[in-house]
Image (cartoon, helix red, strand yellow):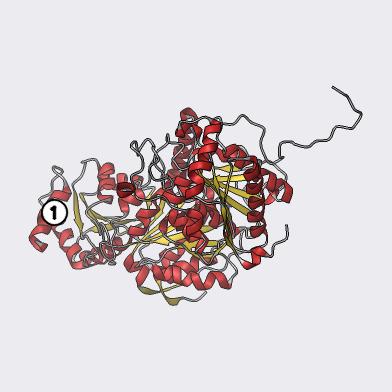
Amino acid sequence: MAKELIKGNTAVAEAALRAGLEAYFGYPITPQTELLEHLSARMPELGRPFVQAESELGAINMVYGAACTGKRTMTSSSSPGVSLMMEGLSYIAGTEVPAVLVDVVRGGPGLGNIAPAQGDYNQIVHGGGHGDYHLLVLAPASVQEAVDLTVLAFDLAEKYRNIVVVLMDGSIGQMMEPAELPPFQPLKTEIPDWAVRGTNGGEKRVLTSINLDPPAQEVMNLRLMKRWQEIEKNEVRFKEYYLEDAEFVVVGFGTAGRISLSAVRAAREQGIKVGLLRPITVAPFPNDILNELTDRVKAFLVVEMNAGQMLEDVRLVVRGRKPVEFFGRMGGVMPYPDEVLTEIKRLVEGPLTTEGHPRDRWLSRLSETIG
Amino acid sequence: MVMTDVPAKIVYERPKVLDPRVTHYCPGCTHGVAHRLVAEVLDEMGIAGNTIGVASVGCSVFAYNYFNIDFVEASHGRAPAMATGIKRVYPDHTVFTYQGDGDLASIGMGEIVGAASRGEKITVIFINNANYGMTGGQMAPTTLPGQKTSSSPTGRDTNRQGFPIQTAELLSTLEGSAYIVRRSLHSSREIRRAKKAIRTAFEVQKGNLGFSLVELLSTCPTNWGMSAAGSRDWIEERMLPFYPLGDYKVSPAVAELKI
């Protein structure tokens, strides 16, 4: 199929539809709305359910219901709306049914603004909802990657009966890029055994997240954790750029990783041996490659569009063995490649330390710039 | 006693849909009556095999244990949304929610109004017992003015705690609502009328006629601090004046239903 110039939100919506999305439930919120709008036209055309819900609470619980039937279902939202969905995500996780969520992240906290940001990392990667569960989180850096990861999201959700989140930011949702859409997949004809469908005279199926017996609930928790270990073993994905001979490594996901790549290329032109590690799964996090890099490089620079949320995951792997520095922009401000290049040069020039916290150093530098 | 040779005839038995198990509901509580009426209707209509129930949060959180049909369990208040997700995927199936008053009329008001206004083709069995039963009898959106509960210990003061919500009346104003009625479970006569309403509500769904809801005034002897008989009297004397029984919305198509 040929590439076409297409907006990120629209491309993700169309990709989901072609991946066999059977039911979509959502609520308008900028910068995600085109996704809902596209499906509001396309789903009825194909005779598939589309509901604009009364709220994000409604939307995620409609997804919960549809997920209990074993059909491919999804919702999409942006940060404040995703906050409202946290309850539902915990229930879906606790019921072990597959679902896909697209979070087109915007500036926060609170209403914040509608500009691109990555401030939802902790909410999505490290919890949000109550209880012990993990979301499998895919972080695209281009419209094409968002399309590809959306298709993958459905397969992974079903494979592990786990929620999969496509964590992108407002810029990927809003920008137009050439992208190739996936071929149409036929709708699934097989219903998983656990899915409700009416007993038709057979044994009844009950899907619930309640278990008043603590030892039995602990067994359920153990099952979730073991499944997550499987996911950690099988599903780590990342992209490496110029890492073969790198002495310095930038770590960034999504758009921050893409901006960093421009900076890394500019630095390479100036003879600096710097590379980029761009996690595609931010959960499970690419610990092994980062650990391996820790053994052979001089220092790391983490770049994010937040106040250093993934930074903590990097620090957990590096464990003070090598200096880690941080550069971020917050509240919907996007970093320029030049700014990242300046940070790379600062890393190269030193002095470097493994003492203190990189966030404190960054904050004091940032206060001088933006006061 | 005079023995006759008239053959024995079964006049009363457990509905097939109802699971033979010991109830977890309190003595004198009418949840069991409501469960039985739903089970009888599913049996009589022969639709149990393609029915999916949605349980809610409250005393009826384990409703699914009593019905031999597929069931899911919603989070607090969200049963109508979950039912929407299922019904949209399976438009030919019967989907119903079973919700209490805290679940439906307080935390779940957004979801129930959304579902009713969309004319979602689901059936809602709504239990109104004027308090939060499962958590120990706190004030609910349905608690009557002056009624003492564990969180309105001196009686509901409408000046400070506002007024009860008349759910059937409220939902009847929505165009998507096809059948909205209030019945009571405090006497055998009212129980028979409630059964008929539940049957109609499921027929409305079967006929694709829109959103249907049956509000059932229900006893809560434990939290009201009354005997079973006393709580039935309390419904009649205290609840009925504020929650009049009746048909609040019967769409023209529903009025033509022949059952």
- Which residue is found at the position 40% from the left and 69% from the top? A33
Left or right of B158? Residue B15 is right
Q: Secondary structure at mark 1?
A: helix
Report if residue A156 is visible in the image: no
Instruction: From the image, tell me which residue sits under label 1.
Output: A363
The spot of residue B219 in percent (x, y) is: 53, 38
Mark count: 1
Furthest residue in direction right, as rendered? B5
The spot of residue B244 in percent (x, y) is: 52, 51
The image quarter containing residue A187 is bottom right
Q: Amino acid at mark 1?
A: Leu
How many C-alpha atoms fall within 10 Å of the one at disc 1: few (<14), some, or many (≥20)? some
Left or right of A249? Residue A201 is right
Chain of the residue where label 1 is placed in the rendered structure = A
Left or right of A201? Residue A366 is left
- Which residue is found at the position 26% from the left and 57% from the top? A110
Q: Quadrant of the C terminus of chain A?
A: bottom left
The spot of residue A152 in percent (x, y) is: 49, 58
Nearest the eye: A204 or B108: B108
Report if residue A117 is visible in the image: yes
- Which residue is found at the position 42% from the left and 36% from the top? B137
